[in-house]
Image (spheres, helix red, strand yellow):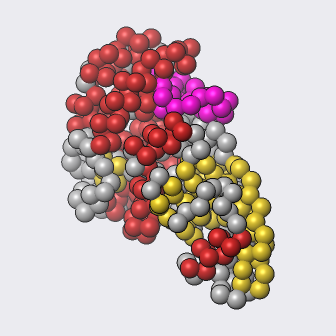
Amino acid sequence: MIPDLPRGFTPSFLTKQLQQNGYLPLDGTVHTVSASNIGDGTGMMAEIAKLDLQYKGNQGSAPPSLIAKFASQNPTNREIATAYNLYERETRFLSELDPLTDVQTPVTYLSALDGDRFLILMEDLTDYDVGSQVVGATLSESELAIDQLVKLHAPFWGKVDSIDWVPHIANSYHADNMQSLASVGAGGLIEKFGDYLTPLYLEHQASFLERLPELQAGMDEAPITLCHGDYRMENLLYGNQPHQNDATVIDWQGPLRARGMNDVALFLGQSTQTDVRRSHEQALIDRYASGLKDAGIDAGDSMELWNEYLYSLLYNWVYVTVVAGTLDTSNATAFAWMAQMVARQSAVTEDLALFDQL
């Protein structure tokens, strides 16, 4: 049973969880817990807290601090998260699928689901640099992000039938929810972020929404793989010391079965700095293809990959419409990163004439 959080982070509760999962010896206990909220406005569907722990007795391998992730306290965001099964998808990814990949993730001490409540206790990597969606990804940060996608996509390339609890990007509850929320968010996107939107979106919004099921079907054509589904800067941590991993991927609430380019285009189109993307997007796509080739996967020739990239960029207007159009933007940090997401997606739309595909 997951208690009401954050007040449920008591010494007795954490002692029990760490002991049951083999991290704290039975002759040791958590003596004190100090919780502080972090990540305000960056993670919309969950709350994130840092827990500083002090122990009595034998501490064993138990960590001095943890990062706790639990259900959003915002009713609207929590309702959306429940509709998309985001909490189930994250807890099951960490327990079932993460061990099958080489993608770098924090150590998970607990991953539990209880109705519309969930709790993940993970390694404290607050000494890493959290990617900034507002600032955007540099070339080196984008390269590291692409490398992690190769490690995620390669093991599941064309091998996703067995993970039937992960929704397809088309013809699934995820697809239905994206369609309905895009219709709901279309007006809100214009109202809240009209200053950042390209006029091309305003011109083509109706036809884009009408053709959304068709676009989803294209993103679900074989070969498909396991995608992160929300691959953006705030969901990557970058090491800044020689002993630290170059990049660590977090926030696994949205895994999908889809074309791998979905993740690539989402990152390059909405997180990579626009001038970096303009100068290096072909090289970054080539880096992705080369990494897959090294893993024994032929992702297609250069023209096929470029066309898939354009198609994925067009489809990713749905993420802009749903996220910026429906989620709470009263938090200044949230508004700032969403504004940059809209602005970058608008720029790539103009640069590459994305709506010509409709």
Q: Hey, which quadrant is residue 217 in on the image?
A: top left
Residue pictured at 28% horizontal, 28% vertical: 212
Residue pictured at 43% horizontal, 46% vertical: 82
Taking the image as drawn, is residue 233 in sight?
no
Taking the image as drawn, is residue 194 in sight?
yes
Q: Is residue 32 above or below residue 199?
A: below
Magenta-highlighted residues: 323-347
What is the count of numbered marks? Answer: 0
Q: Is residue 289 above or below residue 334?
A: below
Q: Hey, which quadrant is residue 115 in on the image?
A: bottom left
Q: Nearer the viewer, residue 244 or 214?
A: 214
Q: Nearer the viewer, residue 66 or 336?
A: 66
Q: Nearer the viewer, residue 308 or 52?
A: 52
Q: Nearer the viewer, residue 346 or 176?
A: 176
Q: Main secondary structure of the magenta part?
A: helix
Specify whether 38 is left or right of 71: right
Q: Position of residue 23 (x, y in %)?
A: 61, 79
| Quadrant holding the C terminus | top left
Q: Position of residue 129 (x, y in %)?
A: 68, 50
Residue pictured at 41% horizontal, 38% vertical: 265
Residue located farthest toward the bottom when viewing the structure as drawn: 27
Q: Position of residue 281 (x, y in %)?
A: 45, 36
Residue 327 is a magenta residue: yes
Residue pictured at 51% horizontal, 43% vertical: 78
Specify whether 233 is left or right of 204: right
Specify whether 163 is left or right of 52: left
Q: Position of residue 174 (x, y in %)?
A: 33, 42
